[in-house]
Amino acid sequence: MDEPLFGGTSRRDKAIELIIGGVGLFFICLTVLFSLIHGFGKSIIHLFFGLGIVALTLCELQLVRWYRMGDLEPKFKYMIASLGVSLLYISIIANVYFWAPAGP
């Protein structure tokens, strides 16, 4: 059996990565669902906000897939992590924007 290109990962690391990724993806899916609900109900701007989040999520998932296949160098791990944190931050901002009361 061939050795992994950049060294192996432990079962604990994989479990932590799957849990964090699953929770993050669940939160992003909820945000997109809320953007659809508010996009067709209140303002089309919410819908475009959700579509932007979907586009960023697809780019993030593609980068993670390439990293797991070994096509990207280990230095891209920090870029992938920072993009994931940024995506979660944008989702938090979107939820605050969707659910905040309009005006005083």
Image (spheres, helix red, strand yellow):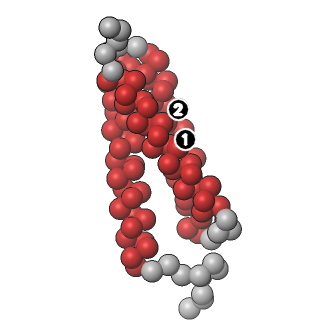
The residue sitting at the bottom extreme is 1
Residue at horizontal 64%, vertical 79%? 5
In this view of the protein, can residue 35 be seen by the observer? no
* Residue kind at label 2, given as amino acid type: Gly
Label 2 – label 1 distance at C-alpha: 6 Å
Q: Is residue 26 above or below residue 41?
A: below
Q: Position of residue 71 (x, y in %)?
A: 66, 67
Marks 2 and 1: CB-CB under 8 Å? yes
Give the labeled residue for mark 1.
56
Q: Secondary structure at mark 2?
A: helix
Q: Position of residue 82 (x, y in %)?
A: 56, 51
Q: 4 left or right of 16? A: right
Q: Secondary structure at mark 1?
A: helix
Q: 4 left or right of 42? A: right
Q: To which quarter of the image does residue 39 belong?
A: top left
Towards the viewer: 74 or 100: 100
* Mark 1 neighbour density, 10 Å: few (under 14) some (14–19) many (20 or more): some
* Mark 2 neighbour density, 10 Å: few (under 14) some (14–19) many (20 or more): few
Towards the viewer: 102 or 42: 102
Residue 17 image label: none
Q: 19 left or right of 9? A: left
* Residue kind at label 1, given as amino acid type: Leu
Towards the viewer: 13 or 65: 13
Give the labeled residue for mark 2.
52
In this view of the protein, can residue 33 be seen by the observer? yes
